[in-house]
Image (cartoon, rainbow, N blue to C red):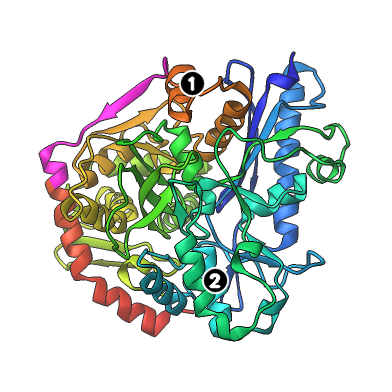
Amino acid sequence: MNLQSFAMGLEFGSTRIKAILLDEKRNVIASGGHTWENRYVDGIWTYTMDDIIGGLQDCYSKMREDFEGKYNTKLTTIGAIGISGMMHGYLAFDKDNNLLAPFRTWRNTITQVSSETLTKAFNSAIPQRWSIAHLYKDILEDVPYVKDITHFTTLAGFIHWRLTGNKVLGIGEASGMFPIDSAKCDYRDDCLDIFADLIKDKGYPWTLKELLPGVLNAGECAGYLTDEGAMLLDPTGTLKPGVKFAPPEGDAGTGMTATNSVRVGTGNVSAGTSVFAMVVTEKTPKLHKEINVVTTPDGAPVAMVHCSNCTSDFNAWAGMLKDFADALGVDIPMGKIMDLVFEKALEGKADCDGIVAYNYYSGEANVGLTKGVPVLMRKPGADFSFANLARTHLYTCLSTLKMGLDILIKEENIKIDRICGHGGYFKAPVTGPKFLSAAVGAPVITMESSGEGGPYGMALLAAYMLDKKEGESLPDYLDNKIFASCKTVETMADKSDIDGFNAYLSNFKACLPVEKSAIESFAE
């Protein structure tokens, strides 16, 4: 086997770290995973360094064992590796590479003031999860460590740096740290100047450009696995240094890649712990706080609607059903319970018959919430059936996303001809695509690889770096090399489902004051 032709993607998702290995024909030949959960510590959603490094090593070791068990061959090298992670967030370091504050994930909604201030100053939406919003929050609060920062990055950038020694990001992930100029594929000079003016009275011994990671495009080499990095990734010493690395990306960019949605006019929805829609546009949309402007891994502008909450509450209800089955002495695997909930949801009333749920485990900036409390309510006359309850919880996963997409469709006049769905929400082959189609009012495409999601997309970006011909663009490579013969399924909801989802959404919007009251009374 020619190990030098293989490509690997490893992604740090919110609840699972997963690695995927592709052979020279770009088929998935091995995988490994590690389950983890974020912690809520002192008002911060975070993971510890032990969580991060231990998860990295466990995930890789399981992928390596899977490969070696199948092929009786030691995985001593790989042609290319790419690291991706849950988008954005904040890790800041000093000159001795000490972490100066606990890692803050995308889930935190503690940067409202800095987010709003920068949005106004830049005339460009700066979401609360963006790295620059976290840095500016601590600047506004005169947190002492800020003067000692020498660099800051995201989770993907941190792991890449530990493995290669290079402080860089792929342009898609970089666009969630600080606004990007797609024309020159680098940070926006005007915003850098504005930021410098905002903090000029602080007297810090650094400029923002010095702190930010370098920006690389898809297909560029982002470094090589060092001796130290090889032992960090694979403590057995089997994997040797020298492996080529693709630019590290976020799960938004890898999701676009995994669904062949990087060409202008295409779009995708990634639905798991969080949910976000990406629509690749010819021009940058006007300023809307609900719409983030990011880029594809090769720098094209993207209109993004991001929601912090998606399937966590659904998973909790499925766990309750598992507990109930266990109490009855019936051994039903969790996967079977999940499948059953998705199946029964199809039998529910199209509008959920007066049941409404809020899946807000954490804050949801798009509706002005800085904290979250899951809430379930129903009208006294509602048919509180298993099917209606199941449909409610799957509808609510998409409701906040739908509110943002309506801005793109109705105010920006962006037409969505079809959209590709991927992530855990779409593992059920009928239900997830049908409900998304009902929400968007357009056909939904799912692919054979839809359930693989980001790790597969990151592996493809690593493969592109290895395979690309002179002048071959990322969209052309994906069209011609990867997805030319890919089997897809197109799902279009019928009118009753579309009308039903809109009716549910009307109830969802009307009852938002109840959710806000619950947060005031009951949030941690």
Q: Which amino acid does label 1 sit on?
A: Ile
Question: Of 91 and 142, which appears nearest the observer?
Answer: 142
Quadrant in the rendering for residue 238: top right
- What x and y, as percent, mark residue 197? 50, 77
Q: Look at the image and say whether residue 495 sits in the magenta stretch.
A: yes
Which residue: 42% across, 65% down?
Answer: 127
- What x and y, as percent, mark residue 486? 42, 19
Which residue: 38% across, 46% down?
Answer: 301
Question: Of 190 and 489, which appears nearest the observer?
Answer: 190
Residue 324: tell me if it is visible: no
Question: Of 361 and 355, which appears nearest the observer?
Answer: 361
**Secondary structure of the residue carrying numbered label 1:** helix
Which residue: 20% across, 49% down?
Answer: 409
Numbered circle sitting on residue 139: none
Image: 342 above or below 135: above
Q: Quadrant of the N terminus?
A: top right
Which portion, as a residue range, is magenta?
484-498
- What x and y, as percent, mark residue 214? 63, 51
Which residue bears the numbered disc 2? 134
Alpha-carbon neighbours of circle 1 within 10 Å: few (<14), some, or many (≥20)?
A: some
Report the side of 253 relative to 70 (left or right): left
Which residue: 18% across, 42% down?
Answer: 441
Image: 464 above or below 35: above
Q: What residue type is labelled 2?
A: His
Alpha-carbon neighbours of circle 2 within 10 Å: few (<14), some, or many (≥20)?
A: many
Which residue bears the numbered disc 1? 482
**Secondary structure of the residue carrying numbered label 2:** helix
Report the side of 105 relative to 519 (left or right): right
Instruction: Name the N-terminal-most of marks 1 and 2.
Output: 2
Report the side of 180 relative to 394 (left or right): right
